Amino acid sequence: MVRVEDNAGAEFAGQGRASGTGAALLEAAMSATDSPSLYERIGGAPVVDELIEAFYVRVLADPLLAPFFHDTPLERLRRMQKEFFAMALGGPVTYSGRSLAHAHHGRGIGREHFAHFVQHLLETLKDIGVGEAEADHVIEHINTFANEITGTSY
Ligand code: HEM
């Protein structure tokens, strides 16, 4: 069985498949075996909305993280995060914000901040009722962006 969502680069699952000769065959082969994206498995747009809303309540209540967001327009941030998560989890959404490296560069975000952020994400996923296996997949996937956030890949 093809389990694209378990592979590196799963955020692009369903996008950018080959076109031209052989594409129809590939498409048919994949649709026969494709499993739903992580985005679909957690419940799609309404769940991503709920997740991001509840997540930032937690993040902004954390004294280690809140100062980073003092000058941030939160409405845009939540909108961008919803797009980013939807896309990163394989949803049919195009992220229209800045690159993660660019948006986070020079803010002094370290591993400790990143770890808190991810811990809040895990707790929020549990709070809103996302199953443990799916929640673990989301966290695994989000962890792959650590270097872009903490500046080690800039
Ligand atoms: C994998 C984890 C993370 C992801 C996927 C993520 C994603 C995003 C996205 C999509 C934006 C919007 C970019 C835009 O406006 O164009 C953003 C902005 C921001 N993020 Fe993150 N972020 C992560 C971790 C963190 C952490 C750990 C911190 C701080 C502790 C942080 C602080 C910020 C701040 C302050 C902004 C607003 C920048 C501004 O005001 O323009 N992020 N993030």
Image (cartoon, helix red, strand yellow):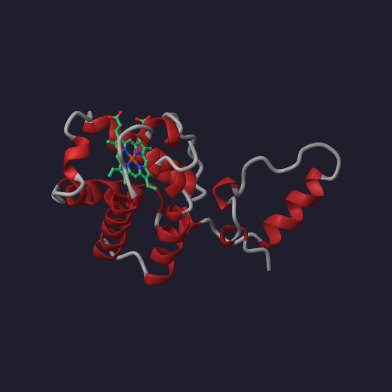
Q: Nearer the viewer, residue 95 or 34?
A: 95
Image region (quadrant) for ligand 1: top left
Q: Residue at x 60, y 49 (%)?
A: 13
The image shows residue 137, relative to residue 62, as above or below, that is below
Q: Residue at x 46, y 60 (%)?
A: 140
Residue 133's x, y, as percent? Answer: 43, 70
Horizontal side of 90 relative to 56 (left or right) equals: right
Residue 47's x, y, as percent? Answer: 33, 53
Instruction: Residue at the far right: name it.
Output: 21
Q: Residue at x 35, y 40 (%)?
A: 81
Q: Nearer the viewer, residue 47 or 71?
A: 71
Residue 78's x, y, as percent? Answer: 28, 38
Q: Residue at x 17, y 45 (%)?
A: 60
Residue 101's x, y, as percent? Answer: 44, 35
The image shows residue 29, relative to residue 18, as above or below, that is below
Q: Nearer the viewer, residue 68 or 30?
A: 68
Horizontal side of 133 relative to 58 (left or right) equals: right
